[in-house]
């Protein structure tokens, strides 16, 4: 009688090499990515990030994107609520600054 052979079962799934996103983290990240998933908001964030001190007045952001001040303010509010920009008031104008490290959390997840 021939000897029994050990059968090696192939592994169907590769093991995880790091902790995946939890449900709450995924919800938070999805909100942040949704805030960035608009061409106007991406442009505004880019303009603020490229400005001196990584800060810009809303009055300087309307012309580059070709939109009225209320529309630009709406987009900036969404970016601020998502944690990408901070807002400070100086006289009658609002200034928006890039929050340090705010883009890092998205980059970390996407880098894997």
Image (tube, rainbow, N blue to C red):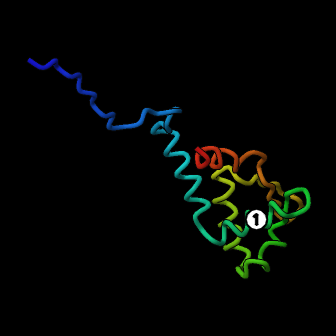
**Numbered disc 1: secondary structure:** helix
Q: Quadrant of the C terminus?
A: top right
Residue beneath disc 1: 46
Residue 67 in picture, x, y percent from top left: 70, 80
Residue at 32% across / 37% down in the picture?
12
Is residue 13 or residue 19 the one in the foreground? 13
Is residue 46 or residue 78 the one in the foreground? 46
Residue 101 in picture, x, y percent from top left: 75, 45
- Compared across the picture, whether 78 is left or right of 15 comes to right
Q: Quadrant of the N terminus?
A: top left
Mark 1, residues whose alpha carbon is within 10 Å: few (<14), some, or many (≥20)? few
Residue 83 in picture, x, y percent from top left: 68, 49
Is residue 6 or residue 51 the one in the foreground? 6
The residue positioned farthest toward the front in the image shown: 1
Is 4 rendered above or below residue 11?
above
Residue at 79% across / 72% down in the picture?
61
- Compared across the picture, whether 110 is left or right of 58 comes to left
The residue positioned farthest toward the right in the image shown: 52
Residue at 70% across / 46% down in the picture?
104
Residue at 84% across / 63% down in the picture?
50
Q: Quadrant of residue 95?
A: bottom right
- Compared across the picture, whether 39 is left or right of 99 comes to left
Circle count: 1
Residue 10 in picture, x, y percent from top left: 30, 34
């Amino acid at each position: 009688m021939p000897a029994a052979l050990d059968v090696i079962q192939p592994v169907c799934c590769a093991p995880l090499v790091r902790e995946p996103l939890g449900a709450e983290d995924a919800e938070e990240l999805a909100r942040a990515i949704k805030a960035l998933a608009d061409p106007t908001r991406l442009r505004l964030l880019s303009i603020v990030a490229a400005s001196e001190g990584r800060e810009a007045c809303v009055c300087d952001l309307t012309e580059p994107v070709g939109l009225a001040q209320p529309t630009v303010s709406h987009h900036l509010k969404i970016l601020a609520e998502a944690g990408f920009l901070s807002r400070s008031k100086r006289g009658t104008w609002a200034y928006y600054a890039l929050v340090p490290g705010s883009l890092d959390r998205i980059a970390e997840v996407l880098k894997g």
